[in-house]
Amino acid sequence: MDELLTVADFEAPARAALDPVHYDYFAGGARDEITLAANESAFARIRLRPRILRGRGTPELATAVLGAPASMPILVAPTAFHRLAHPDAERATARAVASAGTVLIAAMLSTVAIEDIAAEARKVAVDPVLWFQLYLQRDLGFTEAVVRRAESAGVRALVVTADSPALGHHERNDRHGFHDLPAGMRCENLRELRAGEPGHVRQVDLSPELSWRHVERLRSLTDLPILLKGVLHPEDARIAADAGIDGIVVSNHGGRQLDTAMASIEALPDVVDAVAGRLPVLLDGGIRRGTDVVKALAYGAAAVAVGRPVVWGLTVGGEAGVTRVLEILRDELAHTLMLCGCGSPAEVSRDLLPAGPRW
Ligand code: FNR
């Protein structure tokens, strides 16, 4: 893996290693993939305006997000079906992320159960931080059962994905006829456990009937902090803050839901302004470089999360591959902060971005 110098370098060997059907599942986006491309190209359009001669020394990257310590403001976004990428699946991801000292947002649609993900993380870190991504189910009993499992596994926050009233339409998957996991792989968190017996695996329910009422019910069901993932509109951010939501993830699901939705980084400044510091705002979508992280921090994100780069790392090298991807991003972030005259993520502010028309 030594010849892989950038996060982007991991995609070609991952593609070569994967079944083309599964590569397209991971890489693809909705419809014409305009948002998928925009997530990355929008970062390239933003220019930084660095400070000089501030004598800050080597940057300190450690931060805290919703009270959880993280060794850097780069978290791992929830991505489904890691067993398609590597036989060690979410177990490898969990160890790599816990060793890196950052937060893993474990996907509800993981191919390893949340209890096993937590156990793996604890093998390599004393107090690893795991959050759990949840698709709210209309069946409240089912939602509650999944939440209780996550709580018992030691999860420290719930990340409710709110941008999926229906499955995104991925024509790459349609062309391959790929609509289900291969035999032998299951979404282990959807398994109904009865007295320890491996029970029936339910289907995830993505419904356009979901509303703030379902979020309120979740709020009354658990004391865990709740983040809402998939916010792009500042008005939704304001409603979330008023509803007592603990954090927001600005995201378009990596371009996998509404095609032609704005790039995540384009949505970030208005969302940050709308919540006016009432709750932390995170961002995912298109983060591939340390400079991308600094641009998000400059617009007011508390942290960012990465999706596909972690999947490529997992495919290429299992645990070591994910470790390497996170290391590359960490090194690039430290270097970028230095070149911007910042001693820590907290010193990054909007004045690092020149004023003027944004997009
Ligand atoms: C995702 N994402 C996602 N999000 C979510 O809330 N639940 C999920 O099950 C999944 N599954 C998933 C699978 C795959 C293969 C990808 C690529 C993405 C979206 C993910 O959390 C995140 O929003 C994006 O991946 C961020 O964009 P980048 O970093 O991939 O550009």
Image: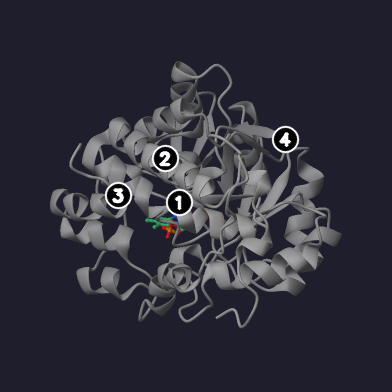
Residue at image mark 4: 67
Q: Nearer the viewer, mark 3 or mark 4?
A: 3
Q: Which residue is mark 2?
A: 331
Which residue is situated farthest in the front direction here? 53
Tell which circle, 1 or 2, labels the residue nearer the N-terminal end. Answer: 1
Q: Are marks 1 and 2 in contact (CB under 8 Å)?
A: yes
* Residue occupying image coordinates x 61% and y 40%: 55
The answer as to whether callout 3 falls within 8 Å of ligand 1 is no
Lateral position of residue 129 relative to residue 332, left or right: right
Q: Would residue 219 be found to the left or right of residue 40 on screen?
A: right
Given contact means CB atoms under 8 Å apart, are the residues at marks 2 and 4 in contact? no
Distance in Å between CA atoms under marks 1 and 2: 8 Å
Amino acid tagged 3: Thr
Pointer 2 or 4: first along the chain: 4
**x and y percentages locating residue 286 in the rendered image:** 44, 62
How many numbered markers are drawn?
Answer: 4
- For mark 1, what is the residue? 290
Residue depicted at 72% across the width and 63% down the height: 272
Say which label, 4 or 1, has the lower sequence index: 4
